[in-house]
Image (cartoon, grey):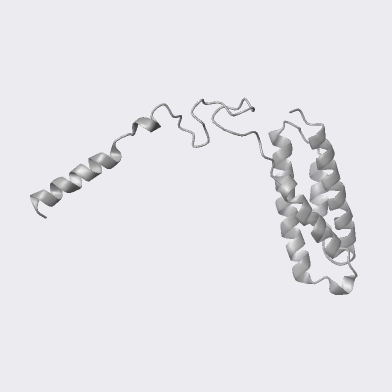
């Protein structure tokens, strides 16, 4: 490599590593707007309030519950497997949201969520669907009463 090429490479490397004046004063968080507090949320290092996980999953679960409530002939084993996966994802999201807002589970939510996943297959599917509807209702009721 020639001396000229080596010097050019070193110069470009140094220029690329230099901090730009517009970036000074920023916090380490990519979500900060520079003032280190969230807009309207009083949360350090973020620019928005908390976004809950479960509400965006609930409409899809309701659609799946309606589909599975159809006559038994049209429900396949892959439908049940898909429901079990979706139910597990939604239950995990609901538990995370409840924990995030500081609502401790007395054990009732965990027991109901376990029943939803255990009551799959055969005649127990309709029971699981009813329990999932009840679980979503409990989640929504608790979240409405959650401290802001």
Give above or below for 48 relative to 129.
Answer: above
Q: Quadrant of residue 97?
A: top right
Image location of residue 90, percent across then percent down: 73, 50
**Residue 79 or 9: which is nearer the viewer?**
9
Residue positioned 56% across, 32% down in the render: 46
Residue sitting at 88 percent across and 63 percent down?
69
Residue 121 is situated, as x and y percent measured from the top left of the image, at 83, 65
Residue at far bottom of view? 73
From the viewer's perspective, is 131 left or right of 47?
right
Q: Is 81 or 7 nearer to us in this picture? A: 7
Question: Which quadrant of the view contains residue 23?
Answer: top left
129 left or right, relative to 1: right
Q: Position of residue 96 (x, y in %)?
A: 69, 41
Q: Residue 108 versus residue 144: which sits nearer the camera?
A: 144
94 to 49, vertically: above or below: below
> Is the residue 68 above or below the residue 133 in the image?
below
- Residue 71 percent across, percent down from the top left: 90, 70
Q: Residue at x 89, y 71 (%)?
A: 72
Left or right: residue 148 versus residue 14 is right
Identified at 87% across, 74% down, the residue is: 73
Splitting the image into 4 quarters, where does residue 52 fall?
A: top right
Residue 48 in the figure: left or right of residue 96:
left
Residue 25 seen anywhere in this rendered image of the structure: yes
| The C terminus - image quarter | top right
Q: Residue furthest left?
A: 3
């Amino acid at each position: 490599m020639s001396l000229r090429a080596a010097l050019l490479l070193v110069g470009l490397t140094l220029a690329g590593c230099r901090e730009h004046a517009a970036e000074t004063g920023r916090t380490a968080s990519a979500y900060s707007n520079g003032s280190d507090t969230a807009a309207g949320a009083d949360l350090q290092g973020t620019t928005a309030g908390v976004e809950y996980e479960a509400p965006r999953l609930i409409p899809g679960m309701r659609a799946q519950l309606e589909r599975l409530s159809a006559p038994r002939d049209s429900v396949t084993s892959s439908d049940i497997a898909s429901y079990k996966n979706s139910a597990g994802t939604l239950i995990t999201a609901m538990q995370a949201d409840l924990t995030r807002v500081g609502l401790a589970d007395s054990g009732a939510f965990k027991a109901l969520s376990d029943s939803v996943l255990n009551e799959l297959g055969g005649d127990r599917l309709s029971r699981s669907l009813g329990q999932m509807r009840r679980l979503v209702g409990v989640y929504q009721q608790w979240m409405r009463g959650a401290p802001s």
